[in-house]
Image: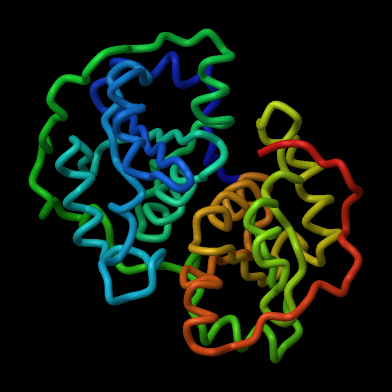
Amino acid sequence: MEKLLVSCDELAGLIGVPSVRILDTRWPVGDGPAGRGLYHRSRVPGAAYLGFDATQAPRPQPPGRAADPGALAAALAGLGVDAGSTVVAYDDNHQFTAARLVWLMRAHGFERAFRLDGGWPAWLRSGGPVETGPARTEPVSRRPVETRPPLLGRAGPAVAGLDDVLAHQAAGLPIVDCRRDSSWAEEPRLIPGATRLPMRVLVDSSGLHLPPSRIRATAAAAGIGAGTPAIAYCGAAISAPAVWLALRSAGVTGVRVYDGSITEWVAGGRPLVPETARRPWGTGAAGA
């Protein structure tokens, strides 16, 4: 199984290690820019801040589309990330911005990117040290962004496009809708052929990932085996990368994220349909 998660205990041991860059990516739902204020009030010691907007392509592309790897690499380099760095990112465990960052970095070939399991809430519960007050000036890169091999290269097989979704529909391959319950309540319809697989069913009541065997069982109930080609989507590719990360860390390796997600799907005038299939899990699942 691929290691994509870092526990609070592991992160505590990485604080101050020169090659480790800790990134706070909190971006609250409905008021994303307030995340920087949260960072300046309290954070994991030594963390730098990287907002969700750094992972987005600028308009006129639909919101949520992946940033150009060069632009993302430059933003990371400005925070001290270079080709020899290990990156640990955390979010608020509700808006899964750290998962999106890790997914994009991995998709572009940066293999030492990890998400803190349970995010900031888990860190606080663990009693880990907290740095408060305005953060010091965020560091500049220790090496130029042109470092070779490239910091970030062309997107790999973790990323799916519209044509991939259409091919999966035609072949009857699994497509899963990963929107959180509040987003689902606003628009309770699916891309045709999809079933629901929100992140909350892959975590326990405290928001930590379930054991790999339970995650694999939930994926199997949704028609996704260890190597089954599948596509995950959400509203703007934030929750879907969290599901990708959870499945991949449990040994389910055939999943890709549709980065355009519903945003791109509906922009092209394509239909959404009501949910018809019975969900493969019981009611009352806990988690983020």
Q: Position of residue 10 (x, y in %)?
A: 49, 20
Task: Tell which of 262 and 163 is nearer to you.
Answer: 262
Quadrant housing the N terminus: top right
Q: Where is residue 211 in the image (x, y as percent from the top left)?
A: 75, 35
Residue plotted at (77% across, 62% down): 225
179 displayed left or right of 70: right
Task: Tell which of 2 and 162 is nearer to you.
Answer: 162
Quadrant housing the C terminus: top right
Residue plotted at (75% across, 29% down): 205
The image quadrant of residue 186 is: bottom right
The image quadrant of residue 148 is: bottom left
Q: Position of residue 230 (x, y in %)?
A: 66, 70
The correct choice, above or below, for 230 with respect to 202 in the image is: below
Q: Where is residue 156 in the image (x, y as percent from the top left)?
A: 42, 67
Residue plotted at (19% across, 37% down): 79
67 displayed left or right of 179: left
